[in-house]
Image (cartoon, rainbow, N blue to C red):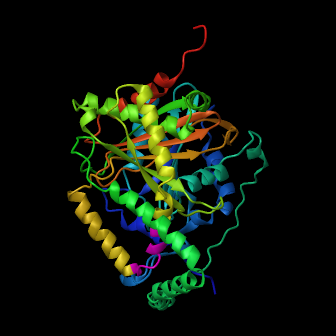
Amino acid sequence: MTPVERMSALDAEFLHLEDGVNHMHIGACAVFEGPCPTDDEARGLFTAALPRIPRYRQRLHTIPFELGRPVWEDDPTFALADHLFHTTVAAPGGDDELQDLMAAVMSTELDRRHPLWEAWVVDGLADDRWALLAKVHHCIVDGVAGMDLMEVVLDDSPTAAAESTGRDEWEAEPGPSDTRLAMDAVGDLVQPLLAASRRLLGAVAHPGDALRGLRRLGSGLRSWVDEAWPTPRSTIGGTIGPDRRWTWARATLAEAKAIRAARGGTVNDVILAAVTRGFRDLLEARGEDPALHEVRTLVPVSVRARHGVLDNEVSALVAELPVGYAVAELRYEAVRSETLCLKLSDEPEAGEAVTALAELVPAPLMAFGTRAAVALLRHHPQRNITTVTTNVPGPQYPLYAAGRRMVGYFPYVPVAFGIRYAVAVLSYDGDLFFGLTGDQESSPDLDVLARGIEAGFAELRLPERGA
């Protein structure tokens, strides 16, 4: 009997959060030099990778009445043509046209009748370039796992593509029956009680560890509560529609490391300081005084123990972006102080503990509660979090697709529930690539944020001696 692979509570949450307006997929726009691959080359690239990505040929199987979390099963109707597309960017094929195409692709949700991913090969770009747009549901991967996934599809050598045969003899395994899933789901309803009992027995057996864990949980939750008060109203947050804007910014990793070396802190501090400058510029461009506003960013933190596993293993912390400071050096020192306090706050551990506790909540209750919250937030968006800033480390060596070198990798993260702007950054081959997502209607000035981030790096550079 084929084992049933059930979703974790966190993975299932990303399904429940999706409602036709708040899209829960992540993605990337990868830019390559050289001529666009032929359709046969593109199919060969993915056909060779599919055996190493089982989830790309699996679809969701939901449980009647949501008695249990969805399970993964092989899709017997899987066809690569349903997921791999070829399109031509609008003339003249510049950055603006590619960014508009990316926004359009990300404005529609993935079809849950099929495996939850798409890839778009894009030709027509100027300067002898082409692009690959990737789109995958957040219930499958987080940012780190998404980067692992891209490294599976791409090659670390321009000649590796010639070594692949492109043959694939995969056959779908029979999926579980509805009867079996229903029986398993009924059994799953008592699992939270059993799991809670095991945790209680573990705490009794190791009271010292349990007490230390409770203290760290309490510390982290207190920190979260301190940041739970709504921020002042601002036009950079509020309701959103189903359509997206998307653009990019970039800097060099060497530049970020030089700033860190000269001013102290971490590369992540440099990135957050640059993002702070971007949001300060955005507020000023909208005629709002940055000194009267609070901008809080949710910063996902990976708790992944090992790479190569497709799921979500992530916690988070909340950082205050000091947009009120007009002087770049003061903003940077404020960011450094904030992140240092957060490292001592136990927020990531508290978030991880809350995620673990979610596994104890019965699936029907979790699904109902999440959808009720989504319906409320759609019309009454939260003001506790202003934006999201993700930072994922990528490989510091070049990757290739069909022998063509990847020269840019710009990530995508969604906006949702009162968050009109989201920032994702990924380091690759010596550069920092920012992907900025906005709501189509309420974020027409997304480019102001992008140019502000780039200016944030420039203003933190120290002048060269003798200059």
Going by the image, does 166 lie left or right of 310?
right
Residue lying at 72% horizontally and 43% vertically, measured from the top left: 156
Residue 51 versus residue 134 in the image, above or below = below
Question: Main SS of the magenta segment?
Answer: helix
Residue at 36% over, 62% down: 18
Specify whether residue 90 is in view. Answer: no
Q: Who is closer to the viewer here, 357 or 13?
A: 357
Residue in the foreground of this view, choosing between 100 and 88: 100
Bounds of the magenta segment: 353-363
Image coordinates of residue 428 in percent, x first then y, are: 61, 39
Name the residue at the top extreme: 466
State which quadrant residue 219 falls in. Answer: bottom left
Magenta stretch containing residue 361, yes or no? yes
Query: Please, is residue 25 above or below residue 408 in the view?
Result: below
Residue 357 x %, y %: 46, 74
Q: Residue at x 37, y 68 (%)?
A: 16
